[in-house]
Structure formats: C-alpha cells, structure tokens
C-alpha cells in the first residue's frame, strides 16, 4: 500500500483489505486499479503495470525525491526507449510499474 498510496498518490476508494481475500480499489485522477493480494500468484506472475502520463519529469521528480527505494535498478532514470516512449520503472517485492510518456 505504501507503494501506491504514499509513493504514487492513490487513495483507497473501496477497502476489503482485512477480509479473507484482501482486495481494494485505488483511485487517482479518474484512474482506478483493482488490487488483489495473493502471494502465490504474485510470485508466479510478478504483476506489472504500465501507467501513461503527460508529464513524466514531474512524476519522476516527485517519486525520486520521496521514495527513491522504489526506483527499479534497470530503469531508474527517465530513458527514451527505441519505440519512442520516455520511461522509468518502479518496483517493490510484489509489483513492477513502468511510468511512460509518449
């Protein structure tokens, strides 16, 4: 939750985190992510999200200043990728997120 709420600024719109099958809906700027907790599936599939922004520099500055520990070692700076997108990546021990600007 620290990854999505503290680092990326999402809020909890629906909360079943303390249920037998933990689940919540995270929201920010009209974007909703349905997040389920399942350690077995996370280990097997290592979920990855791709979030598109119109101002990657602003997002990078905020995240790198406040939660540097989440920057992915293989893409820890904004990089122009061969397919034309600027990207940097974040990770914790269960989820990977690529922040992208076209």
Image (cartoon, rainbow, N blue to C red):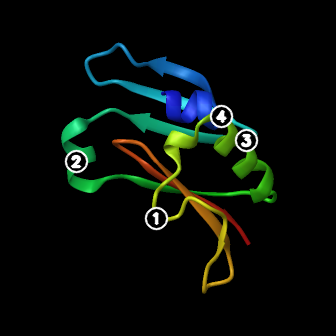
The reply, left or right, for residue 66 in relation to residue 4 is right
* Residue marked by disc 2: 43
Residue 66 circle label: 4
**Which is nearer the eye, 2 or 26?**
2
Are the residues at dot 3 and dot 4 in contact (C-beta closer than 8 Å)? yes
Residue drawn at x 37%, y 52% as measured from the top left: 47
Q: Earlier in the sequence, mark 3 or mark 2?
A: 2
Q: Earlier in the sequence, mark 2 or mark 4?
A: 2
Q: Secondary structure at mark 4?
A: helix
Packing grade of label 3 (10 A; few <14, some 14-19, many >=20) is some
Residue 74 circle label: 1
On-image quarter of the C terminus: bottom right
Q: CA distance from mark 4 to mark 1?
A: 19 Å
Packing grade of label 4 (10 A; few <14, some 14-19, many >=20) is few
Q: Earlier in the sequence, mark 3 or mark 1?
A: 3
Packing grade of label 2 (10 A; few <14, some 14-19, many >=20) is few
Q: Secondary structure at mark 3?
A: helix
Residue drawn at x 46%, y 64% as measured from the top left: 74
Are the residues at dot 2 and dot 4 in contact (C-beta closer than 8 Å)? no
Q: Is residue 46 above or below residue 22?
A: below
Q: Secondary structure at mark 2?
A: helix
């Amino acid at each position: 939750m620290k990854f999505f709420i503290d680092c990326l600024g999402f809020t909890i719109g629906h909360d079943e985190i303390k249920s037998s099958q933990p689940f919540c809906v995270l929201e920010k700027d009209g974007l909703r992510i349905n997040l389920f907790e399942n350690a077995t599936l996370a280990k097997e599939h290592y979920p990855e999200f791709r979030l598109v922004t119109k101002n990657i520099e602003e997002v990078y500055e905020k995240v790198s200043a406040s939660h540097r520990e989440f920057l992915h070692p293989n893409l820890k700076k904004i990089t122009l990728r061969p397919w034309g997108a600027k990207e940097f990546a974040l990770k914790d021990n269960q989820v990977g997120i690529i922040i992208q600007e076209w």
